[in-house]
Amino acid sequence: MSYLLGIDVGTSSLKTALFDAERAEVVAVAAEEYAVQQPFSGAAEQFPEIWWQAALNTARRVLHGADRARVRGIGLSGQMHGTVLLDAAGQPLRPAIIWADGRSSAQVERLLSAFSAEAWLEIAGTLPATGFMAATLMWLAEREPALLERAQCVLLPKDYVRFRLTGALGSEPSDAASTALFDIRTSCWSDRLIEGLGLPRALFPAIYGSAEAVAGLCAEAAEQLGLPVGLPVVAGCADQAAQALANNVLTRGTASVTIGSGGQVFVPHAPDGQGVLATDVSVHVFNHAAAEQWYVLGAILSAGLSLRWLRNMLGWTDDPSAYERLSAAAESVPCGAAGLLFLPYLLGERTPHRDPKARGVFIGLSYQHAVAHMARAVMEGVAFALRQALEVSFGLAGSAEQVILSGGGAQSAVWRQIQADIYGIPLRASLLKEQACVGAALLAGVGCGVYTSLAEACAAAARSGDLIAPDPARREFYEARYRQFRALYARLSQDMHELAESTD
């Protein structure tokens, strides 16, 4: 029996899974929640030390009572785009600025003037956005130049945790691509973009393959975890690539929709016959963890976070059954939530609007509405937004015959059905626990030789449930409501911007 550890550095929590490679199943999982710090309006930061302590705590919990001698390797996945600055001693110089941060909108405009949209898309497969490392580093260069001058390395969130595990600096293509400073064709940092923006090239660490062992477990981490020094730790991958591995979403014709903190549409993509990676400005073409492949990523910023916000507003933060209560409440009212619509732009929006100053809206609110209507409206609003992301992504990479639902939102039966009815396509929910952790563990298994190939590992791990078919009557109803949803942003965006600017 071989065990693999998969660590996922999420936005709301860090999770660690102990994965049985032979049975291809999770043996134990542990999670530790933490907060997003907002030192000022629009900011989103986290302390890297909190990630590290959560990694230690959760790993110890899943290893409790297990035969540690059977652990063969460790893999990581994590939230994308974030920025961790390290000094010469390997210490963080400031809290990490993460993907949900909106402070760098002015810097994004300057980035777009430094290089044409065509150049960004050709090299990086994406335009820069707030929260991306490219924009954050430009903000730091302008607002905190002394710190940037002291920095010796810049890392993404999961790469920082791997650094603490091994003492080795590095990144890999699927996460590095999310910085908008990476050449997705050559799988290397883009000297043209980095040097053209005046950023120090020496900040950026070596690139490894996602399943490549970067280093072994260092003595300090080994002692804290009760694992052997030198245990292989692989580079890992971005969280969206990790869940795709776990769900065997590797080739064209497959796709996934994930409701975690944010919401993501993941569609494997190959260049056209001319070798051109055509793209759309509101989605991203990034490197897959599977070598020499790409994927289209459509992203909304507040998916599960919207429901979490409602939970917290209701004072249910400490109730372990809060999400079950919200799902039951949503199921108790008819589709359409009695005329209540929700626009889930609590942190701005990326696909399809690319608007950091978009803001959340309940529209149609009346005296008759209660918690149940608000819960259903939030679920429907998130699904409407994800449908927009699906349509853009499918338009670029082609539609899929198999669409897998993953993330915490897939645990809710009512939310699954809402998605099927709104997307108008049959879906299957992943039956795996903690797909991002599993994907990270699969990469560790390939890197340490437990599996002969990534394709073998992914095929062994994937589990999906019964087909979730759209209901024809609800689908027809949602078509009309979807048209209303799509029209609201254009009508309200000016007001959103004015209100957002009033808090700057």
Image: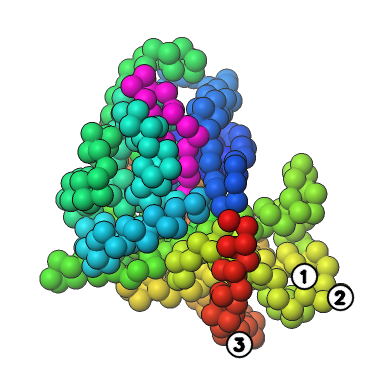
Residue 246 relative to residue 357: left or right: left
Residue 330 at x, y percent in the picture = 74, 66
Residue type beneath disc 1: His
**Which residue is drawn at the image coordinates 51% and 68% (left, top)?**
386
Residue 157 relative to residue 36: left or right: left
Residue type beneath disc 2: Gln
Specify start and end residues of the magenta stretch as a single range.
82-99
Q: Which residue is mark 2?
A: 368
Placement of 354 over or under 435, stated as above or below: below
Q: Which residue is mark 3?
A: 480
Q: Which residue is mark 1?
A: 373
Tell me whether circle 2 and circle 1 mark residues in contact (CB < 8 Å): yes
Task: Pick whichever, 411 or 343, lies toward us.
Answer: 343
**Which residue is drawn at the image coordinates 38% and 58% (left, top)?**
108
Q: What is the quadrant of residue 256 in the picture? A: bottom left
Closer to the eye: label 2 or 3: 2
